[in-house]
Amino acid sequence: MTERKIELEVLRYRPEQDAEPWFQTYTVPCPEEWVVLDALNYVKDEIDRTLSYRWSCHMFVCGSCGMVIDGEPKLACKAFLRDYGDKIRVEPLANFPIERDLVIVMDDFMEKLESVKPYLIPKEEKSLDEGSYLQTPAQLKAYKQYSMCINCMLCYSACPQYGLAPEFIGPAALALAHRYNMDSRDVGRKAREDTVASHEGIWECSFVGACSEVCPKSVDPAGAIQQVKFSSAIDYFTSWLPGGGSR
Amino acid sequence: MDTVTTDIAVVGAGGAGLRAAIAAAEADPAVSVLLVSKVYPMRSHTCAAEGGAAAVAKSDDSLEYHFNDTVTGADWLADQDAVELFVNEIPRELTLLEHWGCPWSREDAGEVAVRPFGGMKIKRTWYAADKTGFHMLHTLFQTSLKYPSIKRLDEHFCVDLLVDDGRCHGLTAMEVRTGRMKMIKAKAVIIASGGAGRIFAFTTNGAIKTGDGMAMAYRAGVPLKDMEFVQYHPTGLPGSGILLTEGCRGEGGYLLNKDNYRYLQDYNLGPAEDKPRLKAMELGPRDRLSQAFYHESQKGRTVETKWGDVVYLDMRHLGEKLIDERLPLVRDLARSYVNADPVTDLVPVRPVVHYMMGGIHTDINAATTIDGLYAAGECACVTINGANRLGSNSLGELLVFGARAGRFAVEHVKSVKAPGDIIEKQAADSEGRVKALFRRPKSGERVAAMRNALTLSMEDGCGIYRTEETIRSTCNTITDLRARFQDLALEDHSNVFNTDLYQALELGCMIEVAHTVAQSALERKESRGAHQRLDYEARDDATYLKHSMAYYNPNGDPRIDYADVVITKSQPAARVYGGSAA
Ligand SMILES: Cc1cc2nc3c(=O)[nH]c(=O)nc-3n(C[C@H](O)[C@H](O)[C@H](O)COP(=O)(O)OP(=O)(O)OC[C@H]3O[C@@H](n4cnc5c(N)ncnc54)[C@H](O)[C@@H]3O)c2cc1C
């Protein structure tokens, strides 16, 4: 079998040299088991040392290599060349400033992630001598899905709302807040509410669901946001009942 | 050059670095901690750990059993005081992670569940499905956000340590976004930079595992200990090297040769029973299993593929429900990368470089030979792993010794004198070295070509079985590469996110670390654990029940010295697995 070759059209942008982004085309081999990341590594090692992108684990878990591949946000290590045509377009994640080539500036994402108090807030400190909390498989299941986020930011790239209103906290950070809220060991929902249930929080989401569609880990951020909205609405209404809530 | 000042600087924000930072913050909130990492914390390779972390938790287990398993697994090269401390402290560390929210898999009544792992007499490996390291890393990272004294410099590449009169006073780092060098002045430095599996061609390790921190300490004069001991994991996917966790075998998977025969029974690991038997067959230790593969392939009983010989991992009898519940990532990876669904198909696997038993020499307080310099995690060598690490001991190790590094560093900063001006000069020299590399011409030796030459030569000469001849040939390649590094080409001359420069810096570290592996392997004329010499097949306790210590030599081969192994309760004996294992 003669080896198939494909063309990678890669967005290039080096702020010191380039006035604006442009596309560079590289011709690369296309073995059956290769993913887009392998093709980029081939470019970097064999053709052009100046191409920059982030990657590390090559096994869908470190979250480094999120990119837009043929118009869709994907992990480059999970996008098999065999599933694409002879020309593949590779761009950085949308909705973020480009730092260089396929590398985006992720400061905003990190701030948002940190802003939702993404850590366990227990009812009271438990000493180590008391051992572990009990948590049944059903209680684990209640939040497990939301704990699977690898912070790859594909959902931010897909989210129309984040594109329009960058102050929106966004899918991954909201799903993470929900992960802790749903944990049987946690009582921090109120503490997270200020950020999460604010205007920049859940209420910005227009529930298009694009975030859940692109998630490589089936976290379903859209579902999480919907649930948060629901429970925050309930909280809001109970707070107006006689003796209800903390407002 | 910008200057940043902190009490404690931590090189690396993986499991060990984060645990160290949190321990320091809890010990004294007034002590400032700076996590400096070349990638964002959640990209650290701890995220890739699948199988779990061992700690005594159940009533049928005991600290003594965990101790004995670890020391035997290590082929008696572990320091027994360190192992004892480790097995004592790890149950509390895993419980602490539970308190911080780690989603450990559970039994029906809500207790933390455990699974069997290779070389362990009792089931004691805590797990979070097959994404244990991922959950541990994210739990640690997210928990670290609670502590105001912990600050971070993400995507900063650490380059050199600053040492004056035997004391460490900080380091230099390059901000990847701008290419700017920074001098980080610190009263204590903790290196937690992870392993160096990338010095081999075929590895489970991510791109970032290039041994930078080991090289930094080594160049500063700290010996690298037991570097010849490199762990091959028996079940990597051919081609990519992606790991299928030992949990596959812990849950009951079989290893089959080309005749569908469970060949491990021919290597003193039997009897072959349907259900997993602890410390036998597929639950033997990794060194033995990888060595058995080598012999099977010598006998022509493996299957040839374009990515080299393979055997099969058979999980079909485990059923879809169990596989989906406990090994979902394995299923995803096998289907995607080798088009084999473990539920219905045999999955091709071969041994793959996985873990460095050796590393920066430390004592049981994680202190190195330089005052104020600590090391923990895979980059360090305490050593609890000796000649062969047991699966699921390293996630525990990074917690126990990461935490100790943090606490002892806090103690240390209280008594530190100000450094002399010499460190400013060292920082300027370090900046000069990086700038010189940055200004290298576009033509010359290519980073990728040199890296390939290195990693293939390591695979050929320092693989599962070694001989004087193969190792010497690798040593020669390394000497050659050290010279060629002076003529390295740099094609990218922009300051912003220059990964050409980043990889050139990594390559420099890889060459130094590989040099210590090869030289230590050459001089250890015996076979022990993961270091197997075809020309010296027996273990030789009289001469080599010793740690090798590799010292940096800028102009030649590392100098290898030896240090005693700490033996307290367990005298060296034969390692017995299979039916007659204790
Ligand atoms: C696929 C896989 C599966 C595994 N499964 C298990 C398992 O089930 N159980 C088990 O016990 N062990 C397992 N291991 C081993 C274990 O995961 C590692 O030994 C451990 O996670 C290493 O953690 P660490 O904190 O030392 O390093 P890492 O998590 O690798 O972190 C290193 C840190 O150092 C930083 N760094 C490195 N160089 C520099 C530099 N020059 N400048 C700045 N920062 C730098 C990196 O950015 C990173 O933050 C597995 C390993 C692999 C590869």
Image (cartoon, coloured by chain):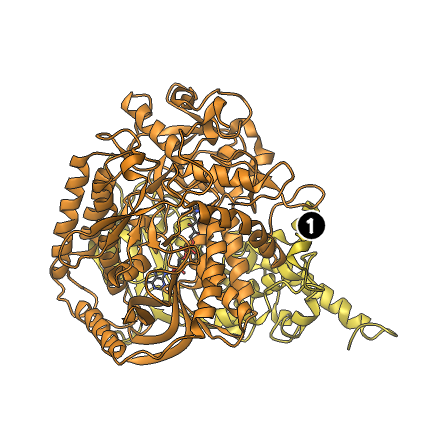
Task: Give the colour of chain B.
Answer: orange
Around disc 1, counting alpha carbons within 10 Å, would you say few (fewer than 14), some (14 to 19), or many (20 or more)? Answer: many
Closer to the camera, A222 or B131? B131
**Helix or strand or loop: what does disc 1 sit on?**
loop
Task: For residue B439, say whether it is visible.
Answer: yes
Viewed as shown, does residue B198 lie left or right of B251? left
Left/right of residue B334 with respect to residue B450 in the rendered view:
right
| Res. A215 visible in picture | no
Residue for point 24% across, 77% down: B422
Q: Is residue A243 above or below residue B545?
A: below
Q: Position of residue B428 (x, y in %)?
A: 23, 76
Q: x and y percent of residue B441 in the render?
A: 12, 66
Mark 1 is on which residue type? Gln
Q: Is residue B51 left or right of residue B337?
A: right
Give the residue at mark 1.
A135
Q: Chain of mark 1?
A: A
Q: Which chain is yellow?
A: A
Percent across and percent down for residue B156 are: 35, 69
